């Protein structure tokens, strides 16, 4: 019975495909998976917008949206109708075609990366040989659409926002990818499905996730910091800095195009979280061996929502970084630590299993973390504060 | 000659042709990116996943971004550069024709694809990785040293000299 519920969506799809002639089956299966991804992740996006506004409201001692529907649950629908009925204003001097293409491209690329994310047992749209590479390759196209949006608007604020966003995305993409590489090294494969399968199994009640190793937890934390910066979330929301450049690269957009940027931002955040789950949190595996009777897709989405809650919590807690702090942190702390983490993962592989490799790896990582943070704050404590804008 | 090949070839050629003929530099870069994506899709269609995805990662994720960043940093206003004058256009055309002739002759008189036959070599990520780490380890290391030197050189150029201050 648990097996049947676990595979219910897979069976449903096979049942539907059974009615289609054989020659059209691959096409039909691809379309069905794509539709499923579009519907499910768009719904999650809607849920998260409400959750975020509610959660932030609670943290700031207010109610958050509570007018549309019971407890404000219909707020996303209201938002959608609002943005659809608004006038679409395009600046007169803007580059019309590029201005139109940017939001479309950013949403397409944001949805495309979900093709390689395994959301449950046997539930992945494309089990590519180089799945993780596909994820990062397609993810890097987001930067180009950010540039297109910022440049085509022909506004100084947009251009400034795009410049900040691209500088930040390039800087944090390197530690993001490098911290993900440790999981690839351990699994010996770039396929997301294989990486999840390598983390299957339990010792006692504890799972074999990569999170529960010294390099795994370091990699996971670095990956999540990188993901926060990639998705322009607080405390890395310089590109949007509402108080300085209003909304950054999409300031000249209105109506539904503006909403599309919003969708893409949240989808990007969800996608990197999904990749973090795949790489470090065992994908769709249950957290304890006695909970394996609960369907695999439930665990994936539970982990995803949990990570979203952490994102919302961070947004409600931390202040925004300054541009120089952001760059220093990225290049002088994240990048060296992720390189050392690669070395630690290699050591882990060659040292004999047992307490030796645990202590050696933990010592190495803790020491380098301590020294790097000392280096970061060197001579920074009692200096006169200078503010530089966008330099 | 499947439909997908024709479609991808059309996209690639359109993109690269537009990159040569458009007036605005940013439009040229965007068109070139389209051509690069088309080329990557062609690689993917041939089953070379690693090469195709690396093509996207490097040319769309890095080279195009570098180019647009250079434009954003250096140009305060978009200057429309006129396409090449007639003499340069003519010489370019001649060069292109000559190159095309050489390539076409080489392909037509070379080994025909029919004689290869059998199973195509596995171009999986695993095979590429093994080849890089075993057979081609020395070139890989040399390229690594070269890139590090380039990185340090770029850093030295960009570093703000002390004492001069703004």
Image (tube, coloured by chain):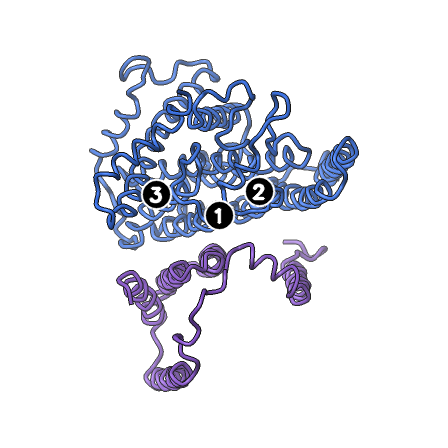
Chain colours: A blue, B purple
Q: Secondary structure at mark 3?
A: helix
One can see residue B78 in this view: no
Chain letter of the residue carrying label 3: A
Chain letter of the residue carrying label 2: A
The label number, if any, that marks residue A107 in the structure image: 3
Give the crowd class for mark 2: few <14, some 14-19, many >=20 residues within 10 Å: many
The quarter of the picture where residue A326 lies is: top right
The label number, if any, that marks residue A216 in the structure image: none
Q: Secondary structure at mark 1?
A: helix
Q: Left of A93 or right of it: where is A198?
A: right
- Which residue is under mark 2? A180
The Cα atoms of the two marked residues, 1 and 3, are separated by 16 Å
The label number, if any, that marks residue A136 in the structure image: 1
The quarter of the picture where residue A280 lies is: top right
Residue at the image position 30 percent from the left and 52 percent from the top:
A94
The Cα atoms of the two marked residues, 1 and 2, are separated by 10 Å
**Above/below status of B44 relative to A82:** below
Residue at the image position 51 percent from the left and 56 percent from the top:
B124
Q: Quadrant of the C terminus of chain B?
A: bottom right
């Amino acid at each position: 019975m648990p097996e049947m519920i676990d595979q219910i969506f897979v069976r449903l799809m096979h049942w539907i495909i059974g009615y289609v002639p054989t020659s059209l089956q691959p096409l039909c299966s691809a379309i069905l998976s794509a539709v499923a991804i579009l519907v499910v992740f768009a719904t999650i996006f809607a849920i998260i917008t409400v959750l975020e506004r509610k959660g932030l409201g609670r943290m700031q001692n207010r109610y958050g949206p509570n007018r549309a529907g019971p407890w404000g649950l219909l707020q996303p629908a209201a938002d959608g109708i609002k943005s659809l009925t608004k006038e679409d204003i395009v600046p007169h001097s803007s580059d019309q075609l590029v201005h139109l293409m940017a939001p479309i491209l950013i949403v397409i690329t944001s949805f495309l990366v979900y093709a390689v994310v395994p959301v449950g047992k046997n539930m992945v749209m494309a089990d590519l040989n180089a799945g993780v590479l596909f994820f990062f390759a397609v993810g890097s196209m987001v930067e180009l659409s950010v540039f297109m949006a910022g440049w085509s608007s022909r506004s100084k604020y947009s251009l400034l926002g795009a410049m900040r966003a691209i500088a930040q995305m390039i800087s944090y993409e390197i530690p993001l990818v490098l911290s993900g590489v440790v999981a690839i090294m351990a699994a010996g494969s770039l396929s997301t499905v294989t990486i999840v399968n390598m983390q299957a199994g339990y010792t006692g009640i504890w799972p074999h996730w990569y999170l529960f190793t010294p390099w795994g937890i370091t990699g996971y934390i670095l990956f999540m910091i990188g993901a926060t910066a990639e998705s322009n979330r607080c405390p890395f929301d310089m590109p949007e800095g509402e108080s300085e450049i209003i909304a950054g690269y999409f300031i000249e957009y209105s109506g539904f195009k503006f909403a599309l940027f919003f969708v893409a931002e949240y989808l990007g955040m969800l996608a990197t979280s999904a990749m973090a789950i795949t790489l470090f949190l065992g994908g769709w595996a249950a957290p304890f061996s006695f909970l394996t009777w609960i369907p695999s897709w439930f665990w994936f989405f539970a982990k995803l929502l949990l990570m979203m809650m952490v994102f919302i919590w961070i947004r409600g807690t931390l202040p925004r970084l300054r541009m120089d702090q952001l760059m220093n942190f990225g290049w002088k702390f994240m990048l060296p630590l992720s390189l050392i983490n690669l070395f630690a993962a290699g050591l882990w592989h060659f040292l004999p299993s047992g307490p030796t490799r645990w202590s050696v790896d933990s010592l190495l990582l803790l020491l380098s973390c301590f020294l790097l943070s000392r280096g970061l704050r060197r001579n920074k404590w009692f200096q006169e504060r200078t503010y530089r804008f966008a330099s | 000659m499947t439909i997908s090949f024709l479609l991808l070839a059309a996209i690639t050629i359109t993109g690269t042709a537009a990159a040569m003929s458009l007036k605005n530099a940013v439009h040229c870069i965007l068109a070139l990116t389209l051509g690069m994506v088309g080329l990557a899709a062609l690689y993917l269609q041939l089953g070379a996943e690693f090469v195709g995805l690396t093509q996207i990662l490097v040319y769309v994720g890095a080279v195009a971004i570098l180019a647009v960043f250079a434009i954003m940093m250096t140009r305060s206003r978009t200057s429309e550069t006129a396409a090449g004058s007639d003499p340069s256009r003519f010489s370019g055309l001649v060069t292109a024709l000559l190159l095309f002739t050489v390539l076409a002759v080489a392909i037509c008189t070379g080994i025909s694809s029919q004689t290869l036959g059998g199973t195509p070599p596995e171009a999986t990520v695993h095979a590429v990785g093994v080849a890089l780490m075993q057979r081609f380890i020395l070139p890989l290391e040399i390229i690594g040293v070269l890139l590090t030197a380039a990185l340090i050189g770029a850093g030295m150029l960009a570093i703000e000299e002390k004492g001069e201050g703004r």
